[in-house]
Amino acid sequence: MTPVPQPAIPFAPDVEVRVSKRRKKTAGAHWEGDRIVVVVPTHLRGAARDDMVEHLTRRLTRHRPQLHASDDFLAERARHLGAVYLDRVVPASIRWSTNQTKRWGSCTLATREIRISSRLRAVPPWVLDAVIVHELAHLVEPNHSPRFRQLEERYPRKHDAELFLDGYHLGLHTDAAGAADPTSGP
């Protein structure tokens, strides 16, 4: 049987390996802050343990690569998306922003800087990509004109991402009992 090549881990988080006497057969992994903690049974050693740690790390980072990703991760995504969808447009900078609570992203035309709301760290990669393409399109066309809409439509999952973000926005502004937060606005 030919081994299937695994995709590269999109960034290199710190990984802590813990050995558990209570675990007999399975290993597990979870995020603790900015690092991944892998818990393995005591009998798992050497190459088998290394393979398990790599597999679990890859699985966690693949599902939410931007969850703990850096601004460099955003810059790489923007370069790639600009090349594929917007004739190689690139921002001067792109970074996560913790103070954007009303918008998913913003673009400053004078400086060509893009900010992405840190609330998007938990969304699927294709949703984040749609927001990045939207902001990159502003570097070509500053307002939401028909030309701008044509540029942003180049991203094939734009409409799916809009639907996702509508629901995500609603969920962010709903309390645990399901009632809308009256201070959240539209």
Image (cartoon, rainbow, N blue to C red):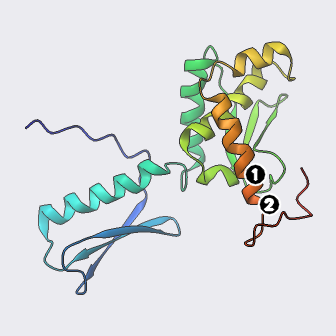
The N terminus sits in image quarter: top left
Q: Amino acid at mark 1?
A: His
Q: Return the mark for residue 48.
A: none
At x 83% / y 28%, what residue is drawn? 109
Would you say 97 lies left or right of 29 here? right
> Number of callouts in the render?
2
Dot 1 falls on a residue whose secondary structure is helix
Q: Amino acid at mark 2?
A: His
Would you say 182 lies left or right of 10 here? right
Q: Residue furthest bottom?
A: 21
Residue 176 on image: x %, y %: 72, 72
Which residue has dot 1 on it? 169
Quadrant of the rendered image containing residue 172: bottom right
Would you say 55 lies left or right of 82 here? left
Dot 2 falls on a residue whose secondary structure is loop
Quadrant of the rendered image containing residue 54: bottom left
Q: Nearer the viewer, residue 78 or 102?
A: 102
* Above-or-below relation of 3 to 117: above
Residue 37 on image: x %, y %: 39, 70
Which residue has dot 2 on it? 173
Residue 182 on image: x %, y %: 92, 64
